[in-house]
Amino acid sequence: MPPTPFLLQMLGNFFSPHLHAFLIVISDTLRIETSIRAVSSPIRIYRIWFFLAVESAAKMRRNETLICAPLMADTVDQLVELMHKAKLEGADIVEIRLDHLKSFDPHFDVERLIKECPLPTLFTYRPTWEGGRYDGDEKNRFGALRTAMELGADHIDIELKAADEFNKFMNGNRPGKCKVIVSSHNYDFTPSAEDLGNLVARIQAAGADIVKFATTALDITDVARVFQITVHSQVPVIAMVMGERGLMSRILCPKFGGYLTFGTLEPGKVSAPGQPTIKDLVSLYNFRSIGPDTKVFGIIGKPVGHSKSPLLYNGAFKSENFNGVFVHLLVDDISKFFETYSSTDFTGFSCTIPHKEVALTCCDEVDPVAKSIGAVNCIIRRPNGKLFGCNTDYIGAIDAIENGLQGSHNIVNGSPLAGKLFVVIGAGGAGKALAYGAKEKGARVVIANRTYDRAREVAELVGGQALSLAELGSFHPESGMILANTTSIGMQPKVDETPVTKEALRYYELVFDAVYAPKITRLLREAEEMGAKIVNGVDMFVGQAYEQYERFTGLPAPKELFKEIMKNY
Ligand code: NAP
């Protein structure tokens, strides 16, 4: 008998790079053809099978957590179509939401759905009182679920509130191979750890083969309690925290041993708030590669959903075979976040609007440059659990601006910024970093900010001049100046906004915008029309990520890959 796929998977997980290389050598030596048509003997089939299995094991999953596609449709025909789509997208199982069908025959249609489904099935017939659409008689609902069990469904879902009645209805029978998921949904909040523990005990007592509970995240720290339950559970658990603040629960569940996560076929076509797409789970977050020892990284911000950091870092982690995952972290209170996620598994963080300044105060140790700037955008958790903060924003932005100026300046030594009048709009984390960087390069710095007092503070820090935002339009002591927007003005979704009039842009040689979504903001478009050179926030983004990546992983940043990823964006 050939080794089991599981054994190969384990071998692949632990020895994949070496084993893979070894097998390539072996297969070359034995001249193993990978074309199935070339197969001529059982021993060859065995070798090819073994080779292909180990090759794919080397690339594939490090967890058994399933991706379940929730399927909602008006008709059975549409559902069948969606099942095939789910398989193509990479789902492992489909949840058939009977309550969304306009009408169906509980025997004929359920049988068809099971027969035609290319993946294992989970039947859910959610009543309105638990967030679903069914508002009919309970006996009919139970009857449809029983039929699904009898006809070969792999799982059915029954709500905790209805579980006793359902068990009576079933009279102790469990037809077929079907596993029963007993579920509970809290659309208001996430209970305390103790209450969650009690909830799980009640779900188990109700006869669950698999426990499911979904709660609502009012704060990202709510997810920690859910991870705690999942990781300690003796029975399979599906535990989700709904909403954007709960996104991490859906991506990291394989790390904590969750039974499944839900992934949608299309963005927004969700059965519960906050579900990512299957495509994002598989391609963006490398879901299959997440295991118990996977290090967690993330971008802390509010808002944060627009951030392309996960795209960049996860792309690099995948190509370098680095055991890490990088997630969006919608954080309201950064101190509370660090207090809650204090394990060394939560290894590194990028930090964006509006947390960069408070983040500095959360660090046990801060790089001297970041201290001078007064903001950190990169935080590393040391193996002893202490937080180290540094600032890579200024390097990324100043490099990008210098590159933008090169060509027009024949400067052998020194920076093309030396002696220039450098106007920074904004006095937050990015504003301070740019003001500091420009000053370091010998520029004369001016800060314009909505809150004038903050502009004055930064101006004092770098020995520059402060302006209110209103004064900026008429500020043109000379031409050939540099302008750098470091506010979120013009960022999606408010793409029609701009921090300064088009007319005022005629005095600038180069205009830079830290906003990178969209890549070309209104400010940059108008600056170009007024004859200025432009540098976009993507160049800064890539530049600041090099150092972060190296600090996160201890590996050299794959610079070409970073550029390639952002070029496609
Ligand atoms: P922050 O610390 O919160 O600072 C925000 C700054 O923007 C403050 O000066 C604030 O003025 C100003 N501001 C915000 N909304 C404004 C409005 N409607 N009108 C006028 N001024 C406004 O944020 P940050 O971390 O510095 O980030 C700022 C921007 O830079 C964000 O868009 C971020 O995405 C971008 N960024 C890009 C990169 C990159 O790699 N491309 C890196 C870092 C940051 P007040 O002082 O008056 O509140």
Image (cartoon, rainbow, N blue to C red):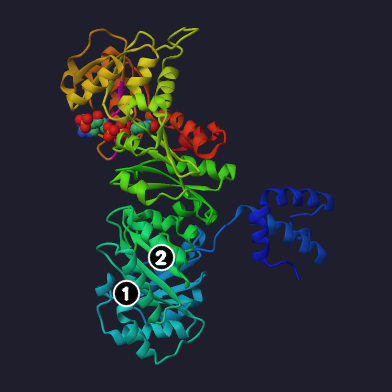
Percent from the top left, x then y, of residue 158? 36, 78
Which corner quadrant of the image does residue 268 belong to?
bottom left
> Is disc 1's CB within 8 Å of ligand 1?
no
Report the amino acid beneath label 2. Ile
Residue 283 located within the stretch drawn in magenta: no
Residue at x-position 51% and y-position 47%: 324
Q: Earlier in the sequence, mark 1 or mark 2?
A: 1
Quadrant in which the C terminus is drawn: top left
Quadrant in which the N terminus is drawn: bottom right
Percent from the top left, x then y, of residue 403? 45, 19
Report the amino acid beneath label 1. Arg
**Circles 1 and 2: CB distance less than 8 Å?**
no
Residue lying furthest left: 470
The stretch of residues the image draws in magenta is 484-492
For the question of whether residue 260 can be seen, the reply is no
Q: Which corner quadrant of the figure contains ligand 1?
A: top left
Which residue in the protein does label 1 denote?
126
Residue at x-position 41% and y-position 49%: 342
Q: Which one is closest to the eye, mark 1 or mark 2?
A: 2
The residue lying toward the viewer, choosing from 353 and 74, is: 353
Q: Secondary structure at mark 1?
A: loop
Disc number placed over residue 229 in the picture, else none: 2
Residue at x-position 26% and y-position 84%: 137
Percent from the top left, x then y, of residue 236? 47, 71
Mark 2 burial class by Cα count in 10 Å: few <14, some 14-19, many 20+: some
Mark 1 burial class by Cα count in 10 Å: few <14, some 14-19, many 20+: many
Q: Using residue 431 as the reference point, say whether residue 1 is left or right of it.
A: right
The overriding secondary structure of the stretch rendered in magenta is loop
For the question of whether residue 161 can be seen, the reply is yes
Q: Using residue 157 as the reference point, say whether residue 176 is left or right of it.
A: right
